[in-house]
Amino acid sequence: MAPHEPSPTAPHSLNGFANVEQEIASACKQARRDRASVTLVAVSKTFAADAIVPVINAGQRVFGENRVQEARAKWPGLISAYPGVALHLIGPLQSNKAREAVALFDAIHSVDRPSICEALAKEIDTQKRRPELFVQLNTGEEPQKAGVAPAQADAFIARCREHYGLQISGLMCIPPINDAPAPHFALTAKIAARNGLQNLSMGMSADFAIAIQFGATHVRIGSAIFGHR
């Protein structure tokens, strides 16, 4: 890949990345956690390569996208040019996009219904590729939002494992925008613990420090790095 010329977004993304790294380190110190126990997923959705490349060059290796189609158009070239970069799907997944998702993503944070489980199980078996899988919870039980209700979480996780043969790595949640996030993070951590799940994908630009206090292993941060879309 030819060197990218600096773009107007590059200085912001570099400054944002440095600030976020400092804040994660500070939050980990306050929580008495090792910085290495928290993976920063830099959410690059809607941003072009010229905003992403400076952040890769600064050392970031894990990126998040919301849509399979956008990621397919943008990331194969970047992954080829920068070996070691990992791509996480953090947005909703349609079952008809499971083939592409399994081929492209290293982790999928939005496993939330039987049709997705079935499609993923089929593609994982066919492609012999196993992205890390997170069950998405709808801790606020918001009707417009995807995710498994907390009361159904144990049964859904068991079905993922026993019926579909999926290896579930952890849980993901997005608290309601007008709620205090802490109770939602605490509930997610509790459900994960009783199901033997080690990973917690929770916390975004506005609340990742709180999420780290409640055990987040993956924080999904976009606007604090790249700016507002």
Image: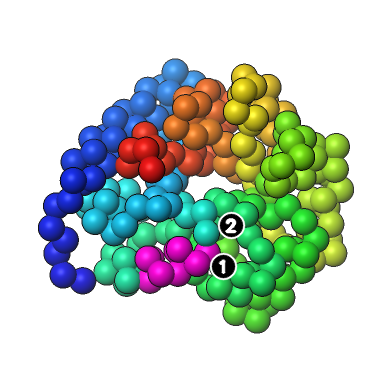
Highlighted range, magenta: 68-76
Secondary-structure class at tag 2: strand
Mark 2 neighbour class, 10 Å CA radius: few under 14, some 14 to 19, many 20 or more: many
Where is mark 1, residue-wise? 101
Disc sitting over residue 61 in the figure: none
Q: Main secondary structure of the magenta part?
A: helix
For the residue marked with disc 1, what is the amino acid?
Ala
Which quadrant does the N terminus fall into?
Answer: bottom left
Asked if residue 21 can be seen in this view, the reply is no
Q: Residue 214's spot in the image, x, y percent?
A: 59, 26
Residue 31 position (above or below residue 4): above
Where is mark 2, residue-wise? 108
Say which residue appears at 74% left-offset and 63% top-offset: 117
Q: Is residue 208 left or right of residue 188?
A: left
Say which residue appears at 37% left-offset and 23% top-offset: 26
Q: Is residue 70 magenta?
A: yes
